[in-house]
Amino acid sequence: MKTIIKKVDPGSPDAEVIEEAGRILRSGGLVAFPTETVYGLGGDALNPESSRKIYAAKGRPSDNPLIVHIADLKDLERIAEEVPGNAKLLMNEYWPGPVTMIFQKTEEVPTETTGGLPTVAVRFPSHPTARALIRAAGGFVAAPSANASGRPSPTSARHVKQDLDGRIEMIIDGGSSAIGLESTIVDFTEEIPVILRPGFINYEMLSEVLGEVKVDPGILSEDQNVRPKAPGMRYRHYAPKAPLIVVEGERGPVTEMIRTLVGKAAAQGKRTAVLCSDETAAFYENAANSSVMVSPVGSLEKEESIAKHLFGQLRIFDENNIDIIYSEAFETPRLGQAIMNRLLKAAGHTVVRAEGPFAREERYE
Ligand code: TXA
Ligand code: MG
């Protein structure tokens, strides 16, 4: 299959491109498109055959449910049974926007789309191109992130092409994603709402609107036996090909430890990279008198920039055939929960704590 790529002005996409993409979706084909979080791989959410194609194109296990995207609040009742009052409050505050809500599904939503579950995840994105496309498609677009399963989510059309070229009908190129991390997911099928995936709408913002909110223990635990409720959060994910080790602690010991680790890896002839903040990048230059790839991902003073560039940076390590990556921890005040959730998954929870000159680096030799 030849994948057509169409560039649009993200704020006001060309009507002909949207019409063509809408036709593809209505006839059961797949179109990748930009949203404010990451790029999505869209198919008609009410057509089981489209959902099967999405799983096949991504190489995704078919028990991992898809999010249904809408572009009009009144469409919610066709797919969701029982929308509780506190969910409506959240919609008032943050829809359209980067938060997904889970409800009991109606008969209209095929179980192929929900990975066999009786519930449905619904998202109303704010991105103008996404909304125009959803309308052109008939109102209900199932869209996981448009990466091959296991790879970092795509934040540009180029990333989508790397993973899905030749496997889908069309990619709409609307430039780079504004947020860069996937939507926050909140489950409203329990008595007290539960955060299944942290995102740009963070814990504090949610509790301000909802009062009591729980966090799914499965997303906090390193223990394989504590299973996250969102099936997609159970898989190894976002992972670059090289092992990634997160070093946490105070800035001084962290930079010192990473310099030491980098020196050792480089001495063994490994292609080594450091994922760090703009503020600390200078500490690693010439760390090993070698060609260490120092990769500042964004500024600690502007944590949105770290979120926005994280996934793209993980892809760059693959493109450069890096053998080992050492990363700082980014425990920033507002987005740290979401950033660290993705980074720790990419690292398979390999974390070292730098506690001073005699930190536990020997564990990683
Ligand atoms: O920002 C986003 O949410 C992006 C853009 C494209 O909208 N989409 C996205 O979809 O991240 P995906 O499929 O990559 O991640 C959806 C997550 C998965 O972890 C999945 O298991 C979970 O949501 N999920 C979907 N439906 C669910 C349900 N009914 N119950 C529990 N978890 C669900
Ligand atoms: Mg995904």
Image: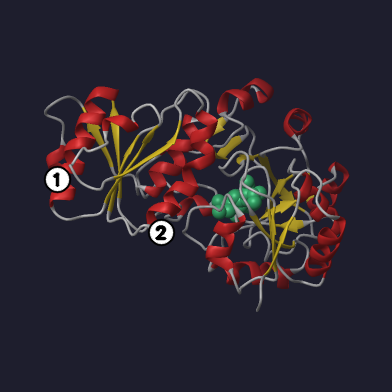
- Across and down, in percent, residue 65 comes to 61, 58
Q: Which mark is residue 264?
A: 1
Residue at figure coordinates x 18%, y 49% from the top left: 266
Residue 219, relative to residue 90: is it above or below?
A: below
Q: Quadrant of residue 60?
A: bottom right
As drawn, is 181 to the left or to the right of 16? left
Q: Nearer the viewer, residue 130 or 49?
A: 130
Q: Quadrant of residue 297?
A: top left
Residue at figure coordinates x 75%, y 27% from the top left: 93
Q: Quadrant of the N terminus?
A: bottom right
Residue 340, relative to residue 314: is it above or below?
A: above
- Across and down, in percent, residue 154 comes to 56, 53
Going from the N terminus, do you reach mark 2 or mark 1 first? 1
- Across and down, in percent, residue 31 comes to 71, 64
Q: Is mark 2 within 8 Å of ligand 2?
A: no
As drawn, is 208 to the left or to the right of 81? left
Are there few (<14), some (14-19), or many (20+) residues within 10 Å of tag 1? some
Residue 245, relative to residue 63: is it above or below?
A: above
Q: Nearer the viewer, residue 8 or 190?
A: 8
Residue at figure coordinates x 27%, y 56% from the top left: 323
As drawn, is 185 to the left or to the right of 313? right
Residue at figure coordinates x 40%, y 49% from the top left: 346
Residue 332, relative to residue 102: is it above or below?
A: above
Q: Disc 2 marks which residue?
A: 319
Q: Amino acid at mark 1?
A: Lys
Q: Nearer the viewer, residue 339 or 64?
A: 339
Is residue 137 among what the camera can see?
Answer: no
